[in-house]
Amino acid sequence: MKVGIIGAGNMGGAIARGLASGNNVNASDITVCCPVQRELDALKDDCAELNVSVDNEAAVIGKDITIVVVKPWLLDAVIKPLLPKIDYSRQVLVTVVAGATTSHLVELAKDYCENPAVVCVMPNTAASVHESMTFICSRNTTAAQVASVKSLFDELGNTMVIEERLMGAGMALASCGIAYALRYIRAAVEGGVEMGIYPDDAKHIVMQTLKGAVALLEKNNSHPEVEIDKVTTPGGVTIKGLNAMEAHGFTTSVIEGLKASMK
């Protein structure tokens, strides 16, 4: 499979690095295009086998899947010159663009193909370490085409094919959500430092604690509140801490932040 990626920023670079270090696609079969040479150079420094170019057409011509990873306001300007170059009989156009819709992609390509195969994907930056939570929706695709795209992003972590109406919620929970999780880690580390723990030790403690929390949920297939109940003894310090967090709006802040991410 030959893959083209347009965009080598944080997300495009994460996808390229993740795919190049996986087993599904040879790094030499991946072409990354970007107008910023230093970003391409950084990719080549990490993986010399990657093909890079400042010409976006190199990510389309001869490729099976082209993944466009750009800022939302750049999407149309980047895609329109490439539409005549796509072989719609076999190629799949994939976007990793916040707010992009399959209907908009179809509308853009209508002069070249009545029913182009288009896919919208939303991973997060943990793709570079093969731990992304990625959402996929599509239009005019065969089951084989969706499976092909899914297999690519399976290399980068966990994937979920969902209805398009849920893409905004998925982005809030996972793509924006990784920043929210990291913000919690930062806050907990700062709390640890205030209590007298060295910063690096506090970070290690918080990271391992989160790993343990996830492992418990995965092993027991339980609701978070079930695991919380196991450590909240009557009159104990955990329930006091939880109540203090709630008094300062912990749950409400998380929910409101997620909802704001969908606007």
Image (cartoon, rainbow, N blue to C red):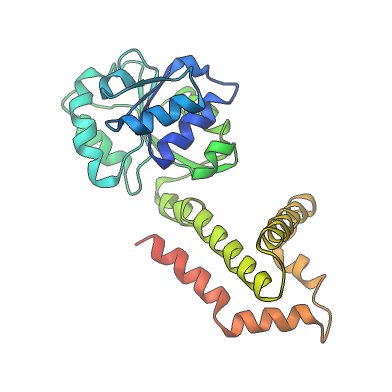
Any part of residue 175 in sight: yes
Q: Quadrant of residue 34?
A: top left
Q: Is residue 155 above or below residue 262?
A: above
140 sits to left or right of 175 = left
For the point 58% across and 63% down, which residue is it? Answer: 186
Identify the residue at horizontal 35%, vertical 48% (top origin). Answer: 98
The single residue placed furthest to the top in the displayed view is 62
The percent position of residue 207, horizontal first and vertical second, equals 68, 56
Closer to the camera in the image, 104 or 80:
80
| Number of disc labels | 0
**Does any portion of residue 121 appear in the rendered image?**
no
Provide residue 125's location: percent of width, then percent of height. 49, 44
Could you tell whether 49 is left or right of 34 in the image?
right
| Left or right for 95, reference 228 | left
Which residue corresponds to the image point at 52% horizontal and 69% vertical from the top-left? Answer: 254
Quadrant of the rendered image containing residue 217: bottom right
Picture layout, residue 139 above or below residue 100: above
Residue occupying image coordinates x 63% and y 66%: 189
Question: Seen from this angle, which residue lies furthest left?
Answer: 111
Q: Residue 164: x percent and y percent?
A: 40, 46
Q: Nearer the viewer, residue 177 or 110?
A: 177
Query: The C terminus appears in which quarter of the rendering?
Result: bottom left
For residue 41, which quarter of the picture? top left
Q: x, y percentage for residue 193? A: 66, 70
Pick the residue in front: 241 or 258: 241
The answer to whether 175 is drawn above or below residue 222 in the figure is above
Residue 221 relative to residue 59: left or right: right
Q: Would you place residue 78 above or below residue 176 in this image?
A: above
